[in-house]
Amino acid sequence: MIRVRGLTKEFDDARDGVFSALDDVSFDVRPGEIYGLLGPNGAGKTTCLRILSTVLRPTRGLAEVDGLNVVRDPEGVRCRIGFMSCNTGIYDRMTAWEMVEYYGRLYGIAEDRLQARIEHIFEILQMHEIRDRLGGKMSTGMRQKVSIARTIVHDPPVIIFDEPTSGLDVLVARNVLQAVAALRDQGKCIIFSTHIMREVEKLCDRIAVIHRGRILAEGTLPELADRYNQPDVEELFFELIRRREDELSGRSKSPDDSEHPGAHGTSLA
């Protein structure tokens, strides 16, 4: 459902000339699977997801969603994906039902099908008690449910979640994760971007650890634990980051620095 090969995104940088937000990234995501992109802030997660959702164009490489190229057929791709981030806004003067209905109409869903679809979504997400509540009077948890509902109103086969639990309290975050798991059980192809280790352990079928635009490791948690002898996902994460930072530090050292073993350090930022 998602196929990425050699994906690279470069931006002009006033100081360094070129900044590589993504550097030769490749992965696949299958139907009925949650694929976790795990990385610190600034790792390249959002850049990758914005390319997949056609918001950004890649500098090089291939990205396909449900067999459609994100550059050659962006409209077709947008019809086949739902995208939700932690920054999704809610209209204060529209009710929950009106907001989901509005997005359904934007996708061109026939009116009879749309009303039945919204009824179904509100039932699944347990939203009937807030169907007539204005956005300006919703709690954070209610707003997140509306965001999920409008993301999936057109029943897309591919769904992208970009740190959807960022800033949420534990109870609301739990509800979001349960909704994501339910979508996987429906056979959806899901990318879940996060920097929260417990979400990865709880939710993801496979993960990719990404740092400074490069994927450092990919696989199931048991596979990665065995490969790197790190049974704990947090320790695995920091070990991979440490190795990458040591590699970058070694490249940047001058010949004089190499003569002084204590001259370099490791950053996990």
Image: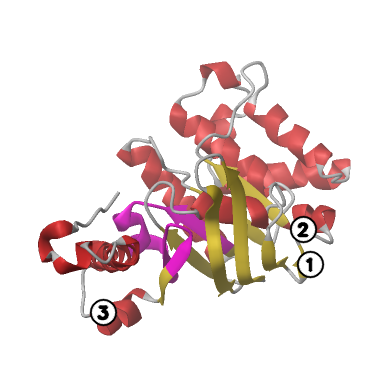
Q: Please indicate whether residue 82 sits to the left or right of residue 243 in the image.
A: right
Which residue is at a point 63% across and 50% down the rendered structure image?
50
Where residue 26 appears, x then y in whole percent? 56, 72
Q: What residue type is disc 3 on?
A: Tyr
Question: Is residue 213 inside the magenta stretch?
Answer: yes
Q: Nearer the viewer, residue 73 or 101?
A: 73
Q: Quadrant of residue 231?
A: bottom left
Which residue is at a point 34% across and 66% down the rendered structure image?
251
Look at the numbered discs 1 and 2 and tell me whether their residues touch, using CB distance below 8 Å: yes
Q: Nearer the viewer, residue 132 or 162?
A: 162
Q: What residue type is disc 2 on?
A: Val
Q: Earlier in the sequence, mark 1 or mark 2?
A: 1
Which residue is at a point 66% across and 41% down the rendered structure image?
150
Look at the numbered discs 3 and 2 and tell me whether their residues touch, using CB distance below 8 Å: no
* Residue with the mark numbered 3: 228
- Residue 240 shows in the view: yes
* Residue with the mark numbered 2: 77
What whole-number distance in Å separates the C-alpha atoms at marks 1 and 2?
6 Å
Q: Nearer the viewer, residue 110 or 151?
A: 151
Q: Earlier in the sequence, mark 3 or mark 1?
A: 1
Question: Is residue 10 inside the magenta stretch?
Answer: no
Where residue 206 appears, x then y in whole percent? 44, 72
* Residue with the mark numbered 1: 68
Q: Quadrant of residue 157?
A: bottom right
Q: Please indicate whether residue 166 sits to the left or right of residue 52 in the image.
A: left
Numbered range of the magenta stretch? 190-215
